[in-house]
Amino acid sequence: MTGPVVVGVDGSASSLAAVEIAAREADRRGVELRLAHALGPEPGEVAPGVPPWDPGGVEQRDRVNGALGDAEWRARRVAPRVTITRGVLVGAPETVLGLEVRSASLAVLGSRHRGGLNGLLHGSVAARLGAGAGCPVLVVCGRPSRTGSVVLACDASPAFRKAAEFAFAAAAERGTDLVVLSRRGTRAARALSDLREKYPDVVVRAHRVRGRAGRPLAEVSVGAQLIVVGVRRRGHGAVRVPRRCAGRKVLRYAHCPVVVVPGEKA
């Protein structure tokens, strides 16, 4: 995709880490980086001449501009050639971000901290965003490695194919190997055979796991660059993600960034 990389910004340390990763991803793809700051729902009437996102006046405007300015500085430090734009979104963060990423090639979010776009990562929000918007969502968990493997969480869902395509491309872009994490009885050879041919330089290693997924996910994510997992894509309207969805488990246990990739529409 040629759409921008969209990253949620709220001024926190987690979102600034997400900005740096998003800037590198935009640089790899040769696309624009979009810095998105979300405010809460519009609080009723606003005085004439006042921007709808700025009912609080100078103090709020300075806070928003400060967060976006810091984010832009961090982005330019790691990817000086990337074109950067800014956006202030008014409304429920999950809703406005979903609209913002409709034409994006990737959405990037921080995790586990205060409000804004990034405070939404508890539970299955990232999975719902990916499933609803049709855009891969990268969640910055743990400590990213610049030299580790890309890990693909294998399952039997229809979304696995799209996740595998993303994982192979990510491994090829980074010049690293791909670890395919699967449970006993999961068959993925057919889905991966043509991708092995398309990306002949990517070394693929199988990693079988037993028992509950938590511990193996935690172990394999230490030192990895990314974990990639698929989620079933839904049409317009509410998107529900089952409690046993692999995306939820990976987000809960991972020590590295996680990419949630939507499959074809159900």
Image (spheres, helix red, strand yellow):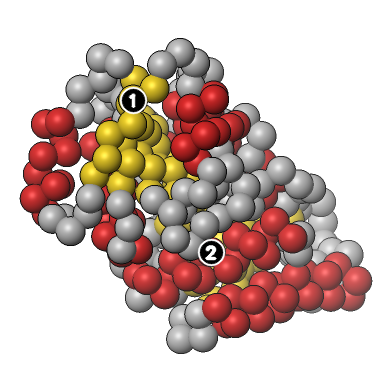
- In the image, taking residue 39 as reference, residue 19 lies left or right, namely left
Of residues 135 and 234, which is closer to you in this image? Answer: 135
Residue drawn at x 60%, y 60% is: 18
Residue drawn at x 57%, y 82% is: 76
Q: Nearer the viewer, mark 1 or mark 2?
A: 1
Q: Amino acid at mark 1?
A: Arg
Q: Secondary structure at mark 2?
A: helix
Query: Mark 1 or mark 2, which has the lower sequence index?
Result: 2
- The residue identified by callout 1 is 208
Where, by quadrant of the figure, is residue 30 drawn?
bottom left
Q: Position of residue 225 (x, y in %)?
A: 46, 53
Where, by quadrant of the figure, is residue 211 drawn?
top left
Query: Badges 1 and 2: C-beta atoms under 8 Å apart?
Result: no
Q: Quadrant of the C terminus?
A: top left
Residue drawn at x 55%, y 38% is: 254
Question: In the figure, 217 relative to 22: above or below?
Answer: above
Q: Quadrant of the N terminus?
A: bottom left
Q: Secondary structure at mark 1?
A: strand
Q: Position of residue 152 (x, y in %)?
A: 35, 39
Disc number for residue 21: 2
Q: Position of residue 201 (x, y in %)?
A: 18, 58
Of residues 219 and 197, which is closer to you in this image? Answer: 219
Q: Position of residue 140 (x, y in %)?
A: 58, 51
Mark 1 to mark 2 CA distance (whole Å): 29 Å
Residue drawn at x 39%, y 22% is: 209
